[in-house]
Amino acid sequence: MKVRASVAFLILLLGYTTAKAGQPPGTWQPAHDMNESRASHTATLLADGTVLVAGGYQFGSGSLASAERYDPLSDT
């Protein structure tokens, strides 16, 4: 299972608008899949508007010692 909602939730929670062309502000938009599925991770909105998703737990594999950076403007 890939984690999609955590980044979108963080952005919505912090009030950061990432609406794409044609998307009404404040609405949900599915985000690109992360490279690794995660639970109990952190997601931090950085000054440049990207989101750093770090650590957490992967079911079947245990704790994760990795991080991914997500850019909501390019959905990557």
Image (spheres, rainbow, N blue to C red):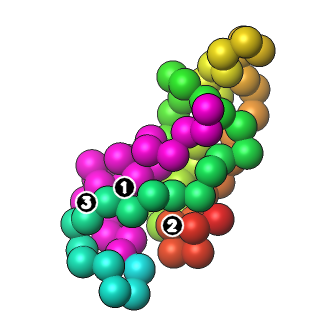
Q: Which residue is painted at 39% across and 63% down in the image?
A: 29
Q: What residue type is labelled 1?
A: Ile
Classify mark 3: helix, strand or loop: loop
Q: Looking at the picture, which amino acid does disc 3 mark?
A: Gly
Give the residue drawn at x 25%, y 60%: 15
Q: Position of residue 8 (x, y in %)?
A: 41, 53
Q: Residue 15's mark?
A: 3
The stretch in magenta equals 1-19
Q: Distance between the residues labelled 1 and 3?
A: 6 Å
Which residue in the structure is indicated by mark 1? 11
Which residue in the rendered view is the most extreme toward the front?
1
Looking at the image, tell me whether mark 2 or mark 3 is earlier in sequence order. Answer: 3
Q: Quick check: can you spot residue 63?
A: yes
Which part of the image, by quadrant, shows the N terminus? top right
Locate residue 7, reporting x and y percent: 46, 49
Tell me the residue that label 2 is attached to. Answer: 72
Of helix, strand and loop, which one carries label 1?
A: helix
* Residue type for callout 2: Pro
CA distance for labels 1 and 2: 9 Å
